[in-house]
Amino acid sequence: MRRNTVLGLVTALALCVTGCSFGQPDPSGQATSAVSEPASTAPSESTPPTPADPDQPAGPDQLGDPVITRTSAVDGEKVRLTLYPVVRDGSVSHLTLVLSAPEEDAERVQIGQLLSDANTTTSDTTGDAADGLQLVDGKNAKLYLVASDGKGRCLCSRNLSNLFLDYGNPVLLSAAFAAPPADVNAVQVRIPHFGTVKNVPVQ
């Protein structure tokens, strides 16, 4: 079942570069070519988790079965990550995840730079975007970085310093990448602070 629930604005984009071969990184640090549409902003902390595209409302129950759930410590508080399959849409692929606070009496956690690549000279210049997410195609030895519009904005959830995790208010985040080849049905997903998740389905 195809689930085009996130970043509907990039379905018409044609990304010319599909990745960086291991050992031969792109000098620009980008795994995809520049595209014309700006990235969308993640939902506010007071709303239920919804995709970045307001014209396609959806929650985690519409994303299908999660691949994995992990918990990590952020500023001494537990943060739960729920990861969903990578979804192809032509030459673009979408990655969706949900962050939540699993403990009712926990302090609020600012998402901020939690998923950032910590490099403001690469895909996003703000430092508080989800541009640290990566896809690894082991079959073809390629690393996929989050797509960029070429103007210092990633095609991913941004302005995450404005988002806080409270118990009962999960936040849905997303990122767009060039799509792996059609014969690739699983990739590894690297997530800052949460490690690498293997065998993530590509649908």
Image (cartoon, grey):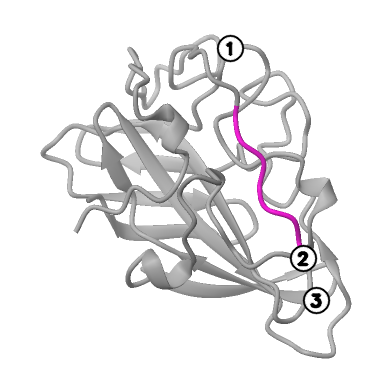
Query: Of callouts 3 and 2, which one flags the residue occurring earlier in the amino acid sequence?
Result: 2
In what element is the residue under mark 3?
strand
What is the distance, in whole Å, between disc 1 and disc 2 at their CAs?
A: 31 Å
Going by the numbered disc 2, the residue's amino acid type is: Ser
Q: Is residue 185 left or right of residue 93?
A: left
Tell me if residue 44 is in the magenta stretch: yes
The numbered mark at residue 77 is 3
Contact check, label 1 and label 2, Cβ < 8 Å: no
In what element is the residue under mark 2?
loop
Q: Which residue is rendered at x = 46% and y = 31% of the image?
A: 9
Residue 131 in percent (x, y) is at: 61, 37
Contact check, label 3 and label 2, Cβ < 8 Å: no
Magenta-drawn stretch, dominant element (helix, strand or loop): loop
Q: Is residue 50 left or right of residue 128?
A: left
What is the distance, in whole Å, between disc 3 and disc 2 at their CAs?
A: 19 Å
The numbered mark at residue 150 is 1
Query: How dense is the environment of label 2, judged by Cα within 10 Å: few (below 14), some, or many (20 and up)?
Result: some
